[in-house]
Amino acid sequence: MTGTTPKKTTPTHVSKKEFEELFRAVCNWGRWGNDDERGTLNYIQPEHIRRGAGLVRSGRSVSMAVPINQVAGPDNPRPATHYMVQGFDIHSDRGEPQFSADYFASEFHGDCHTHLDALCHIFWRGKMYNGFDADQVTSHGANRCAIDLLRGGIVGRGVLLDIPKLRGVRWLEDDDGILPSDLDAAEKEHGVRVEEGDILLVRNGRALKRRVKGPWNVREGCAGLEASCLGWLYERRVAALGGDGHNDLAPSPYKLSMAPIHLGAIAMIGIHLIDNADLEELAETCKRAGRYHFMFTMAPLVLQRGTASPVNPLAIF
Amino acid sequence: MTGTTPKKTTPTHVSKKEFEELFRAVCNWGRWGNDDERGTLNYIQPEHIRRGAGLVRSGRSVSMAVPINQVAGPDNPRPATHYMVQGFDIHSDRGEPQFSADYFASEFHGDCHTHLDALCHIFWRGKMYNGFDADQVTSHGANRCAIDLLRGGIVGRGVLLDIPKLRGVRWLEDDDGILPSDLDAAEKEHGVRVEEGDILLVRNGRALKRRVKGPWNVREGCAGLEASCLGWLYERRVAALGGDGHNDLAPSPYKLSMAPIHLGAIAMIGIHLIDNADLEELAETCKRAGRYHFMFTMAPLVLQRGTASPVNPLAIF
Amino acid sequence: MTGTTPKKTTPTHVSKKEFEELFRAVCNWGRWGNDDERGTLNYIQPEHIRRGAGLVRSGRSVSMAVPINQVAGPDNPRPATHYMVQGFDIHSDRGEPQFSADYFASEFHGDCHTHLDALCHIFWRGKMYNGFDADQVTSHGANRCAIDLLRGGIVGRGVLLDIPKLRGVRWLEDDDGILPSDLDAAEKEHGVRVEEGDILLVRNGRALKRRVKGPWNVREGCAGLEASCLGWLYERRVAALGGDGHNDLAPSPYKLSMAPIHLGAIAMIGIHLIDNADLEELAETCKRAGRYHFMFTMAPLVLQRGTASPVNPLAIF
Amino acid sequence: MTGTTPKKTTPTHVSKKEFEELFRAVCNWGRWGNDDERGTLNYIQPEHIRRGAGLVRSGRSVSMAVPINQVAGPDNPRPATHYMVQGFDIHSDRGEPQFSADYFASEFHGDCHTHLDALCHIFWRGKMYNGFDADQVTSHGANRCAIDLLRGGIVGRGVLLDIPKLRGVRWLEDDDGILPSDLDAAEKEHGVRVEEGDILLVRNGRALKRRVKGPWNVREGCAGLEASCLGWLYERRVAALGGDGHNDLAPSPYKLSMAPIHLGAIAMIGIHLIDNADLEELAETCKRAGRYHFMFTMAPLVLQRGTASPVNPLAIF
């Protein structure tokens, strides 16, 4: 499939100064004005949406969402709840129609559910993206950079980089870090190039491994992007990033941050992140279709002042 | 705007036999096989998705979702809840990053939140769509026709019929029923025709009226489709139907059903319904664009055995 | 019933200095040591519990709790939720037994549900009772003065002061403030004296008025204790205080505090408060029994780091 | 401590007929009239409450509740949730007071939380206690035998039978069944006799074992009462029963019922059950006090149509 040698991440011993430089180098604060709360979504222009729509050929849509999970487990310590409000046993007073209804509750951040992080989710030294104060997030939610700003959804061109395919494995091992050179190599292997305004999905195969091996505590180990990818994401001007893990390699090899991709992408570059996607069907479809770009659409719930939303992103071929 | 005279619905005095005939005439049970759980979504073929994508020209996406509403009111007796799991006050043990997270809960059927009804939501004499037994829905959810069957979303061509525009009013009055002749007239006025596999949105202006006048109990009065529209929906082979009210005229002029559109569309024809959309921005956009058809995408949460999902449907122009 | 003239509270125009003096005069910070988190519950000694038990004669227990309320209304904007986890429709795999189960959720502070406020509920200038910092309460709950410290319950002698009975009315009007002289007069009328370590219940008749007149927004008006009662509560060394309203007169006649009884009793004196009790059956029972003291027991749920618990306090005669 | 030999339960091979006879022999249906919904609580007469109060001597109250548990685990697959509604970060519009508040949700049946089962919790062949139809329990809760009938609480004399003490062990092993002869022997060892109207607590030591060994799946193994104890409970006329496990020995040695104590005690005898208590402090207190009877009080939340309530039962010495 590829000549790329699977790599283990070398724990990176960087000074505090070097580490901070990593973040400062990708800082987009002020780039779109001092009031901007959309970050790199600003890269998506009408032409990107048209370009995405132009990729619809076979008329097939593919979900990237895992099912809402009510079973507690190592990657789901606070399972979602789903109760029936009423069921078939209730007769309405007029006899017809009878109906069923339900109730759903979830703490959708976490290690299990496909969700979209808002830019208010992460703080760097008391500041969120664009320098807004962290105390804009209170018990009542976020006054800045909340998820409801994305009411109109994220629509455009999606690109999948399938790292296990690149490496000729079914899934990445838990200590496999993904480096910028992997992203470059995957582009080459797939015949695609990530461009300004694209929604980038990076597969590590977690969803497949989870189906085969069962759930595990991804905080203790999960393949993901190495912090050195931040520069790549910044320079390529990706509009949004998603992955089947937490996007971050876990545990972090850096003492200074447990999640440098979250920190750098969300708080510095201004990239909204999709965590815990299921990219298996997408990878199969790309492989069969022989192309790794497609129309992408995703519409978060309009949760005012929310820091995230559960989502079901679609790739349309 | 139009010469159409606003109409009040004439309370329809029909015999039980005539009323039942209304439903039997639109029954799609068995049409796509005895195991079918997708109903009229079967009308959406790859060509419909391609056709939808072909309508993306200006590269603008428009949301049809109302914000999740935490304030109790006459149309929101069981408000959603949204709590912070953690906020800026929590320092992670490694110092960086700090993050915020939240919890969301909702009984998303009801009169307020934009949601997509699954085909298991409504029963006709102990049966749901395609004749599945109502007791397939238990305290643990629906074994048949649940919302997670729509994991791949609904994508295709959307068409808006803007009835207040047709009648030259800002919004319909609460006792205004929408008749098949209104749908025909709106098509003519808009220069569009609802065709097989389309996702149809019918505006009555409720969201605008709500913003201007405040919320009211829509169970006691809300404009909507008259039961006689069932035949129209059936014949035109719409794939899905949405409205800014409950789609049904309320209260029902029929003693035999409090919601004949829900009953007929969901249980008999097999049409998934979007209730409580906000079609104001869509109507403005259609008017400005001079066209009432557009690409439509919507992806419900993958809520296993659920009877509905909160959704944020998008129109892409 | 009594010669006491019903009184309207005179809006009190006090200087900021005088108002602050009110709180400083009743400050118990440090009284039971710098680590104390129990406040006036320290007054309850074994002899008080024995004394309470000694009042059990007729062997009848009376609840002071309102039912958990799932219906939104002016005093219940965030109604509790109660869903069935399973019902009679579910057959266990062994056939027997079948069982039913449920789920319950509540934001139990507020204007409707009978609950016990922990001492971490109220802050005075960034401090809670005994001078603990307010930032001991975070998104994850309270590290100090939380409700689970009362795991062993509150048991002792309860005393009811029935102010409507004193004034010869069914219930107090919404702008009726209760003054120290009312408490003294009620003691005299009832033939009881509030002593150190007693649990004091003060009735204003709200639960009866609510049943007769329907719910109203008690934030806009509800009878309660005037701030001048703080000195009385402090001097009499009551161990806990409960009422059928919010204990506080609402709205507050003071610009400097919307709830001076909550502020003074909880944060300064260290008194746990029971809000929104139903004291009707208790008042009837006291009247019939001809005595206004009884055994009192209440056991909050052991909600770690919680700021309150829903409770069902009992009076045992 | 005692000469009693620890026993393993002999798996009981009984015919279906013999097994059913076990239940029929303890059936109290109709005993207190055809409308009775209180079951053996009818045994508690005023004299029992007075007798309970008469046992208060040292003035100490002891909780039997485990803390509400938010951590998923083998005995807590659906952990409770607790979120802050507001915290110290929120300033009221008048500046003072600031306050904190929270939200709590729980599915309180299950293997972890101390709760009181209502008589509507268990069905025997489509019937609950006293022959009420199981379909009186719907998606909207129980119309018969619901927990809110116990608004006035359960107050009386409590008796602890400490089986590990009897057997000279710290806790019972998971396959240890408790037989009627154990109950008799414990009475003798403790110098107490269970009488009509008593609230009986039977300790197996689970809470201590859990603290020492960690949580385990109690469905797969937990000490408890053998089904043959049903006759004993019936004859002794206990008013309520509680235990630190599920009261039932698990797994059930009977093919015909996974929980014969639940089935027999609740549905046939009409005994309300307290599951998952923590009886450690109670056992210590009884041992030190040299007596195994005490005043008992417990007041469930007034959850209308509920099948149970979380509780914090108190023993007062």
Image (cartoon, coloured by chain):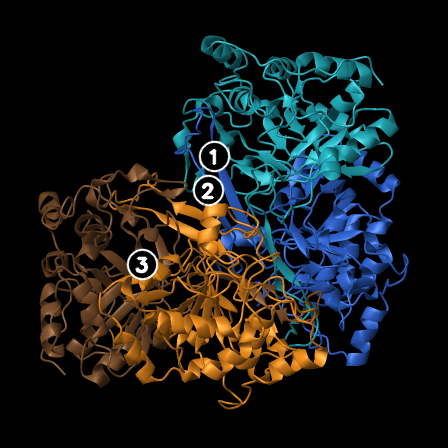
Chain colours: A brown, B orange, C cyan, D blue
The mark lying in front, picked from 3 and 1, is 3
Question: Where residue D225 sits in the image (x, y, percent)?
Answer: 71, 62
- Determine the chain carrying the residue at label 2: D
Q: CA distance from mark 3 to mark 1?
A: 35 Å
Residue that appears at 51% across and 72% down: B305
Residue C2 shown left or right of residue C46 in the figure: right
Question: Where residue C3 sits in the image (x, y, percent)?
Answer: 82, 12
Q: How many numbered dots are placed on residues in this image?
A: 3
Q: Quadrant of residue A47?
A: bottom left
Report the amino acid beneath label 3. Gly
Q: Is the Cβ of the residue at disc 2 closer than 8 Å to that at disc 1?
A: yes
Q: Quadrant of residue A93?
A: bottom right
Q: CA distance from mark 2 to mark 3?
A: 30 Å
Q: Quadrant of residue A282?
A: bottom left
Badge 2: residue crowd in 10 Å (few <14, some 14–19, many ≥20): many
The first of marks 2 and 1 along the sequence is 2
Residues at marks 2 and 3 on the same chain: no
Q: Secondary structure at mark 3?
A: loop
Residue D285 shown left or right of residue B175 in the figure: right
Which residue matches tag 3? A152
Which residue matches tag 2? D84
Residue D56 shown left or right of residue A250 in the figure: right
